[in-house]
Amino acid sequence: MSGCGCEVTITDRDQQQALIPLLAINGIMFVLEVGVGWYAQSTSLIADAMDMLADALVYGVALYAVGRPMIVKIRAAALSGGLQVALALLVFADILRRYFLGSEPLSLLMMGMGLLALGANVVCLLLIARHREGEVHMRASWIFSRNDVIANLGVILAGAAVAWTGSRLPDLVIGSLVALVVLRGGLHILREARDTPHP
């Protein structure tokens, strides 16, 4: 509600103005993070990069749904959730590969990239905050942005733990937790899409 007692309405244009920068930020961060994660041999960074890719796809799908009928928005949210689940499973496969084949994660790169990603996702969270109680496709965007901040903090923690212990296990553990966050978010959105009334 506004100070004059009038209801604040969120228009299609408001949604588009929030989603376009979110799509751009996550797309750029995916490219940066997957490159650094590969070079740094970091499972947690790769997991976070996949999360960025999933979010970019989510925001793109949500942007497509703006202004369309509710059934399209529900299907867009369901597609977003399915993409999150699929990418989480890919990350788990990479974690298993690194567990058996070995890796030597670079802790300083992990922490530096984690901090950069955290800053980017805090901006995303602020941009999408007013839509967190909105339509299902926008609620999906809010949930993914919120989960990103948690994942970024995990990457920073993993980098610090690798530096402190000299072991790659913290990276594998945090990478698994980030993948679980992504998986949980995807399943949550699938449930919301299923339970949202539609004509």
Image (cartoon, rainbow, N blue to C red):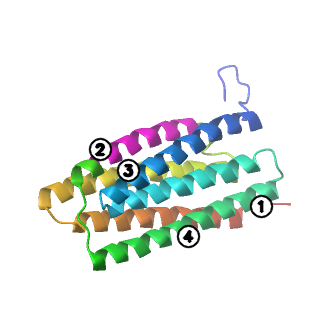
In the displayed orientation, state which residue is furthest to the bottom.
Answer: 100
Q: CA distance from mark 4 to mark 1?
A: 25 Å
Rendered-image quadrant of the C terminus: bottom right
In the displayed orientation, state which residue is furthest to the left.
Answer: 165
Residue 166 quadrant: bottom left
* Residue that label 2 marks: 112
Secondary element at tag 3: helix
Q: Residue at x 16, y 55 (%)?
A: 163
Q: Could you tell which of marks 4 and 1 lies nearer the N-terminus?
A: 4
Q: Main secondary structure of the magenta part?
A: helix
* Residue that label 3 marks: 152
For residue 150, say whether it is visible. Answer: no
Q: CA distance from mark 1 to mark 2?
A: 44 Å
The amino acid beneath tag 3 is: Asn
Q: CA distance from mark 4 to mark 3?
A: 20 Å
* Residue that label 4 marks: 86
